[in-house]
Image (cartoon, rainbow, N blue to C red):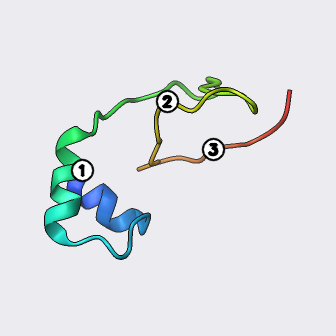
Amino acid sequence: MDTLEVLKKSGLLPEASGNQLSTLAKLCTQVEYEPGLIIGKQGDEVKKLCVIEEGEDKSFSL
């Protein structure tokens, strides 16, 4: 699925217009992570927003 479709499907920005989502999609980078990889910890400075296209996440405190 292309990035624009992932953003639309996510429902993350329901008020965003098609043009706004299209602009955001151009700024996105698609990344694949291995299962079990820790990509952030509670308290870490947030530098990116992850939208999960396939699979699931788990949140926990270390």
The secondary element bearing badge 1 is classed as helix
Query: CA–CA distance between discs 2 and 1?
Result: 16 Å
Q: Residue at x 47, y 48 (%)?
A: 52
The answer for how far apart the CA atoms under marks 3 and 2 are is 18 Å
Q: Residue at x 34, y 76 (%)?
A: 15
Residue at 24% across, 60% down:
5
Judge from the rendering whether residue 61 lies leftward or rightward of residue 48; answer left or right.
Answer: right
**Is 43 left, or right, of 33 in this rendering?**
right
Query: For residue 20, which quarter of the picture?
Result: bottom left
Label 3 belongs to which residue? 57
Image x and y of residue 13, in percent = 39, 66
Estimate how packed mark 3 is, as few (under 14), some (14 to 19) or many (20 or more) residues with alpha carbons within 10 Å.
few
Left or right? Give the position of 58 relative to 30: right
User: Type of residue at label 3?
Assistant: Asp
Give the distance between the C-alpha atoms of the residues marked 1 and 3, in whole angstroms. Answer: 22 Å
Residue 1 shows in this picture: no
Amino acid type of disc 1? Leu
Position in image of residue 61 (x %, y %)? 84, 34
| Residue named by callout 1 | 24
Check disc 2 and report the residue beneath it.
47
Disc 3 or disc 2, which is closer to the eye?
2
Question: Does residue 36 lie above or below 25 as drawn?
Answer: above
Q: Nearer the viewer, residue 51 or 32?
A: 51
Vertical placement of 2 versus 62: above or below?
A: below
